[in-house]
Amino acid sequence: MSITSGHSNQGPGKGPIIALSVLLLTALALGVVYVFPTVSNQGYAPDQPIPFSHKLHAGANKIDCKYCHAAVETSRHATIPSMNVCMNCHSVVKLDSPHIQNLRKHFQEGKPVEWVRVHELPDYVYFPHNRHVAKGLACESCHGEVKSMDKISQFAKLNMGWCLKCHEGVTTPKAVLARVRIEQKNPHGPIGPLHCTACHN
Amino acid sequence: MSHAESKGPELAGVVGFFSSPETLLKATQKTREAKYKHFDAYSPFPIHGLEKAQGLKRSPLPYVTFLAGLTGGCIGFGFQYWTSAINWPLNVGGKPFNSWPAFIPVTFELTVLLAGLSTVGAMFFLNGLPNIKKKAFDPGITRDKFALMIEAPPGFGQASDDDEYFDGVTPVKKKVVDTGTAFEVSSATSFLKGLGATDIKTVYNEGWF
Amino acid sequence: MDKQPSTNTETTFIPPRHWIGPEELEASYWSNPEIQERRSQEFHDKPIETLEMIEKLDTKGIARRDFLTIMGASMAMASLSCARRPVHKIIPYVVKPEEIIPGVPNWYASTDPDTGLGLLVKNREGRPIKMEGNPDHPVNSGKLHARTQAAVLDLYDVDRLKEPLAGNRQDGSRKAVAWSEADAAIAGKLQKASKVRVLTGAVHGESTRRLLKEFTGSFRAGEHVEYEPLNWEDIVEASEEAYGTAVLPTYDFSKAELIVSLGADFLGTWTSPVEHAAQWAKNRKLDSKKASSAKLSKLVTFEPNFTITGASSDERFPVRPGDELKIAMAIAYELLMVRKFSSYAGNSQITSIVQGYKTETVAQEIWKDPAISSAATAAIKQLGKELAEKRGKSLVVAGGLASRTANALSLQIATNFLNTILDNEGNTVDGTLAPVIRPSAGFAGMAKLIKDMKAGEVEVLIVHHTNPGYTLGKAVGFEEALSKVPFIVVLSDKDDETAWHADYILADHHFLENWGDGRIRKNVYSLQQPVIAPLHSTRSLQDSLLTWIRAAKLPASGLAATIAKAPDTSNKWYDYLKATWHEVHREVGSATNFDLFWEGALREGVVNLARAKGLTHSKASPRSFRAACFSKVPAYKADADSGLTLALYPKISMGDGRSANNPWLQEMPDPVSTATWDNYLNMGPATAKKMGIGQDDVVTVSADGVSVELPVNIQPGLHAGVVSAAIGYGRKKAGNVAKEAGWDVFPFLKVVNGRLVSSGTPVKVTKTGKFFKIATTQWHNATEGRPVVNDITLATFKKNPAAHNETEPELRMETVPTIWTKHEYKGYRWGMSIDLNSCTGCGACVVACQAENNVPVVGRKNVRVSREMHWIRIDRYYSGNSERPDVVFQPMLCQHCENAPCETVCPVLATVHSPEGLNEQVYNRCVGTRYCQNNCPYKVRRFNFFDHWKAFAGNMNLAWNPDVTVRTRGIMEKCSFCVQRIRDAKERVKDAGDRVKDSDIKTACQQTCPTDAIVFGDINNPESRVSHLREDERTYRVLEVLNVKPSVSYLTKVRNKEGGEGEHLAQKETSGHVTR
């Protein structure tokens, strides 16, 4: 049977419109994912139980990072200082402040202050502070200008790509780069390990 | 059979139907010899020799395929090479960083992918698809009819303000390039009749909407 | 030589040279398509939950839908990508202990009080996570065996008693009490009591012994009794009979060129296995460069059960329990009667007994099979000859639970006699200079205690660290006697079988939480110090005794009185210990003051008196033999054919069962049977065939009114009249892990003439028709006829050290052409060499690796379907016939291949090769495709099918090593060459600009191996040991023909055996297929 009309049975083609909309939506989704990455905690600045200010202690009072974060040269953790370190000064300093009184109360009761962790890597990453400090890397390179932070916030992305860029020698601070190049007698190439078990074991 | 309802004012051309592939072929040949420049033959199945008779040029599609395939291959191999040998060289199974035998499957796949997709896309484009402006003048040309249409040049029959244009100083007459036999409905009709076509009619451009 | 399977022209079947089960020696096995199909399914591609399989797996019924439940739960836990980041806390110390740096381990020296082994305990943030040997300790020199490696998990056992309990002896109910309440009640009873007994395990600590003496001395009739189920009572008693001194001598196997073991599993469970394994291995190392003059010691074993000592023997003969005496006397016959060796050849008191033990008579009585009896006769005659030649350089040892028949004392006397006439006394046997200062802790003391208890002569019984309610069985009347004691206090870590009868069950410290000292040798003082504050409300025995002395105002004398009178502290035992060490200080004659000396002793963990007094080069003197003791040796009497006799034996993983709740030990495969999780009845293949019993059939074993159901394990190499079963299982009151495992065979102990007899009981074995699939690992890794192990004789080695190393086709990995250039390994390149000659199969490496790398425990069900998780396994291959097979142990771990087939196929590159030659497994990248596991030719990759880490709930989380990722479900894992240790070693030397040397890095397996079979190091360093070993001609690589270029190489096993070039040892590898 031949078709009696010149029109086809289907309605006019919706194909192009569908194709176009799918394309647009995909583009939109990709754009969103690109603009809003889901796996970085850069800028995370939580409130702490006692509002410890690095700006005051490390900045104005010029206390060295390693005074409190003492294990950074010997251990893979930098460690949060134990309360007796705080009490080294605050047994006598600024006793009128309610925060210090709160701190002292914790100490006297034998309860540690439960700080909110800001810089955290997943369990399967083994980042060694001691190795990086040994190569002359300044704390500020990864943690930012802590001396000017009232409330600690995460300065760097701390994701693997960010770490690798430094290991490759791309974003390495100049001083460290120069030193390592001389040490390794290697003017080009990576300055840190790039194989997986350097950090994942 | 009712004649094609012409919605739009534009004239598409004059079409004549033939009864068999051979007659269509002969007609096509004669049409070309008559120096008609715009005409097209329609058939449900490919007819050997029809493109030659029609004087169709070779499609540029193979070039598209080739270039796209080449691009795909280069992207495939290049990306693998860049990641494996330059950006992050990792020793996997003792293979060298540029382990080209291992790169073969992806390279091949990307070549085929890009070539295939581009070919399909280019084919659609070259076919003028998606096409919302024209509908087939008779659905039977995909089933059991053979047709030859002598096409009107675009803008034929309309008040043309293209004959003259103003270059700012003087009106200049448009040069009419010799495009072979000029189109004229009645002469085309009679020509087709002379070729042995049946059911000759004028067709107007009909869109889908 | 044994008779070999005939290969005449008619027969077309050639059995494989190395086989795993005796079925492989039958042609019908290889031609059976069903069996071959099942065998080819390495990873069970068919669903495991077919009804037939479920019904076969366990007669008790299993939870069938565990699998689906777990799946369902996982779907519920699917997380959303847009969830808010959870808040994590970071919590510092309030006052940080000065010595703790988070992230840096501290090492403490201590001692294991049960075995006397010196320990270095690795502590992280105040908790122990790994045990290693103390290299300064003269007994174990830095090595440990499996049970001590696993001891750290006992500390964190969730089924431990957490507080003292008061028990109701009528209905068994329990009530938690405070320490003060318990102490008041106990002190009250002690004040009024005069007949008090303290029953403990063997106490090595001098200070503890002293305290116990002072405590029991404060009662009119107070006594300290010691009892250990695995004791050496017969050796000590024989020493008294033969030499007049009741000591347990120490042995030096490194001085012995010829060793005869009569049932003594000295490499595994006899006296001091770690020390003996290290000594024995010294004479088993070979250097191919000096092949033509190579010397190996020779070990000939006669034993009822198949132990790892038998497996490592050059020549082994299976005997019945009790036959060991006959063998000893046959050897004496050869020496005295045939060779007229030694002055005792003229001593009629001795010869009158010896002459009855003619070698041929003995051999023909023991072995009905003429092939074996003639081989044994020849071997014994050869022994007579060689022993006579090697005066002072041989060693005869005997004993062990499997040989403890009514004749146990006679056996030891005969052994003493042999050692005396062979001049071993003072050379390889030391009974004078540094014998083991250890009480015999034998049955004699226990028998008296039982008698006293039954007679009502005991008013208060205090029990500590011994469990006779389980280990003595009902036959001895211990439980019955307990009911006659009015007041019982048990100090224990579990509410165990003995505590069941107690009025007070006091929670005891784990040895890692307690102070103590040990004097395992006459001249070695070890210190034990706590490495963690007590986890629960527990208290040590010593603190309890001191508390009661004070509270009950007991008239104790000496130091106990002094301490008890001092101001009340909780450190009374520490003060006591320190006070007794003033005497050690004096004895050592140290020039430093006591405090410095004490600090030094704590740091070293051991005070070696011999070294301090300059006695290291002194020689022991031979003890003089009293011929009169031969009156205790019976004249020869042929045993009536009594059918099957039972031998009880301790497994190397389980011992006497005190750690039955330790999942690491339960899952450690037994070296010879490769079974996990249960005990079973070992039966020889011929016996089993005759009775129509197959592997995993459940049978009832009965004797003297005791009957136990056990599944059968077909064990090649057992005497036709012997069945054996392991003790330490079937513990219902030791915790949730222990109660699932095995069946109790202690009830088969019986008392004969006042002696506790464990073996030689005639038993009846009847089929029950039930079926219990023993979870073995042996079938999971079949070699399919490929050349995996290599063993040759000494004669062959001398001619050609590289014998049988040829691969087929001839392909040495260095010579294979490649289509691309190899990667260069500049810097470090890690490799390993394993000496098959030294590996005894003890399994210490398996447990050490598990402790170091957070390897999970999967349970019996998963072991049955090949899902055990051990990163290193000990493969066991038999060769020869199934009556007297030879054994090769081969530790198999990730070979870290240069051309790793696993790396190539990972779709996400979760496994790559490091620039130092390590095959890396990146856990967070792995998506669980398992293609790598499929591709691995060595089958060493382990996949986490489930969240096994969750099994370590509660306290057990503390046992994880924080330097190693804990893997969840869906992740592949495998040996990483202890990459965390490599990193640590590199970091330590990096800043000094040094390179890592052999002394800087030891993988966990290498560190604990008592025989140093495993050697790991930097191949790029020509000075390292592993570089030398790789050059040795004896080196071969497993499956070298595949050209995967493994970094692990093996050294061929060389046996000191005669008759080398026969078909047996020169036979090429076949898979047993029928050929034309």
Image (cartoon, coloured by chain):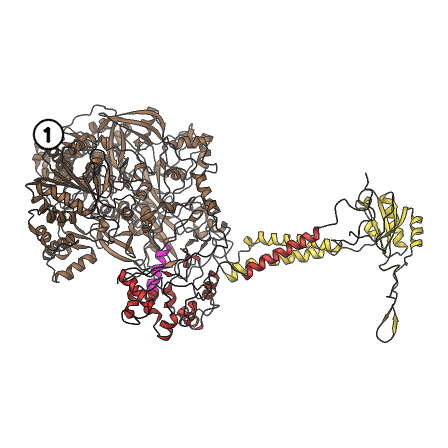
C632 sits left or right of A134 in the view: left
- Can you say whether C677 is above or below C1030 in the image? above
Could you tell me the amino acid type at mark 1?
Ser
Please state the total of marks drawn on the protein image: 1
Chain for colour brown: C
Chain for colour yellow: B
Closest to the observer, C460 or C155: C460
Query: What are the residue bounds of the magenta stretch?
Result: C977-990
Q: Judge whether residue C1021 can be spotted in this image.
A: no
Q: Estimate the x, y position of residue A157 in percent, counting from the top left.
A: 47, 63
C507 sits left or right of A124 in the view: left
- Can you say whether C509 is above or below A94 in the image? above
Q: Judge whether residue C60 can be spotted in this image.
A: yes
Closest to the observer, C714 or C383: C714
Give the residue at mark 1: C352
Q: Secondary structure at mark 1?
A: helix
Closest to the observer, C873 or B168: B168
B178 sits left or right of C929 in the view: right
Q: What is chain A's hue in the picture?
A: red
Neighbor class of circle 1 (other Cα within 10 Å; few <14, some 14-19, many 20+) is few
Q: Let me know if residue B56 is in the magenta part.
A: no
